[in-house]
Image: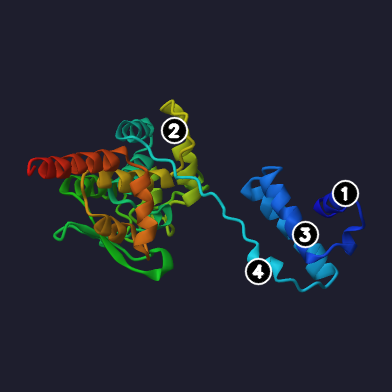
């Protein structure tokens, strides 16, 4: 489609066009036609495929033309919305999972693979062994949350998983769900957690397009609002770079308000010296 369009734009066979003309056409699409980043990317790929891969034109244009993708900010829930979602969970297993993800900023995969031994009660922390990139880390946890986790584990006592899966055929085993959980050899699936979360979002009457990972985003944002060091938050989240964590400074209005308050104090201090 874009190859035909560039031919019509210049009124000639597209194959006869040169590098400068194709560059001018891309500028036209962006400047005059107001193509968005995604549409520009499609146009570049189509034209590059035709002129470079089909016609064999080795142009420097393809190295210089880049599309800056606009990344949307993640969904962050208010504290009241988090409470509403957790409260909407009828199943204790999912209710505890949601609580823990928000309490510690865990990824869903890290959560479902947790073992009872990963809860270090004396140190007040959780060891994340199956983290992204293979990097182990520790995250702090309160005594109250440890109590919630312990009470839940005591219901099934699975030696391998804090959140064991029941499996599709557990009802046919004619055993109680607690017994099926104790015997389980696998953790609860990520898909099951996602589905349960969407049910809770709907039950809570929220219109935000929230997913389980939104609890992790909310954890980071709310800690930042409470004045926790962004470097500590980055460590707790397991980010390889501090730049990734800096995203959350765009998600809290309090950070800007505190900046204004600080600027006011600085201005007042200078003004008092006059």
Dot 2 or dot 3, earlier in sequence: 3
Q: Residue furthest top?
A: 205
* Residue 37 showing in the rendered view: yes
How far apart are the two marked residues, 4 and 2, measured between alpha carbons? Answer: 45 Å
Give how far across and how far down residue 147 sits, in percent.
Answer: 19, 47
The residue carrying pointer 1 sits among few (fewer than 14), some (14 to 19) or many (20 or more) residues within 10 Å by Cα, namely few
Mark with earlier residue (1, 3): 1
Q: Is residue 197 toward the left or the right of residue 80 in the image? A: right
Cα distance in 3D space between marks 1 and 3: 12 Å
Single out the residue that lies furthest toward the front.
274
Q: Farthest residue to the left: give it.
A: 273
Dot 4: what SS?
A: helix
On the image, which quarter does residue 41 sit in? bottom right
Q: Of residues 258 and 110, which is closer to you in this image?
A: 258
Q: Which residue is mark 3?
A: 22
3 vs 4, front mark: 3
Q: Secondary structure at mark 2?
A: helix
Numbered mark located on residue 32 in the image:
none
Q: Looking at the picture, how far across and down is residue 217, in whole percent?
A: 37, 47
Distance Cα–Cα, label 1 vs label 4: 25 Å
Identify the image quadrant of the C terminus: top left
Vertical order, 47 against 143 (above or below): below
Q: Which residue is mark 2?
A: 201
Q: Using the image, determine if residue 174 lies above or below residue 234.
A: above
Provide residue 92's location: percent of width, then percent of height.
34, 39
Q: Is residue 70 left or right of residue 82?
A: right
Q: Nearer the viewer, residue 243 or 26?
A: 26
Q: Crowding near pointer 2: few (<14 within 10 Å), some, many (20+)?
A: many
Q: Earlier in the sequence, mark 1 or mark 4?
A: 1
For residue 63, the mark is 4
Instruction: Kindly state the secondary structure of the residue where label 1 is placed.
Output: helix
Badge 1 is on which residue?
A: 8
């Amino acid at each position: 489609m874009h190859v035909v369009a560039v031919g019509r734009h210049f009124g000639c066979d597209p194959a006869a066009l040169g590098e400068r003309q194709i560059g001018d056409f891309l500028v036209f699409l962006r400047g005059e036609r107001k193509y968005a980043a995604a549409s520009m990317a499609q146009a570049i790929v189509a034209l590059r495929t035709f002129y470079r891969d089909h016609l064999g034109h080795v142009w420097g244009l393809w190295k210089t033309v880049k599309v800056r993708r606009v990344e949307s900010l993640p969904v962050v829930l208010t504290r009241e919305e988090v409470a509403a979602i957790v409260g909407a969970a009828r199943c204790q297993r999912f209710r505890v999972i949601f609580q823990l993800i928000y309490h510690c900023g865990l990824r869903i995969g890290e959560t479902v693979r947790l073992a009872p031994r990963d809860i270090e009660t004396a140190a007040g922390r959780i060891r994340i062994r199956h983290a992204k990139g293979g990097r182990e880390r520790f995250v702090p946890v309160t005594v109250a949350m440890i109590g919630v986790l312990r009470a839940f584990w005591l219901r099934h006592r699975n030696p391998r998983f804090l959140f064991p899966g029941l499996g599709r055929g557990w009802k046919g085993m004619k055993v109680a769900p607690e017994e099926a959980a104790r015997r389980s050899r696998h953790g609860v699936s990520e898909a099951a957690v996602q589905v349960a979360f969407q049910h809770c979002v709907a039950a809570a009457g929220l219109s935000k397009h929230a997913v389980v990972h939104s609890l992790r985003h909310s954890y980071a944002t709310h800690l930042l609002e409470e004045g926790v060091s962004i470097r500590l938050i980055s460590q707790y989240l397991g980010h390889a770079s501090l730049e990734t964590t800096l995203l959350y400074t765009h998600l809290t209005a309090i950070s800007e308000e505190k900046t204004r308050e600080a600027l006011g104090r600085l201005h007042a201090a200078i003004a008092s010296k006059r």
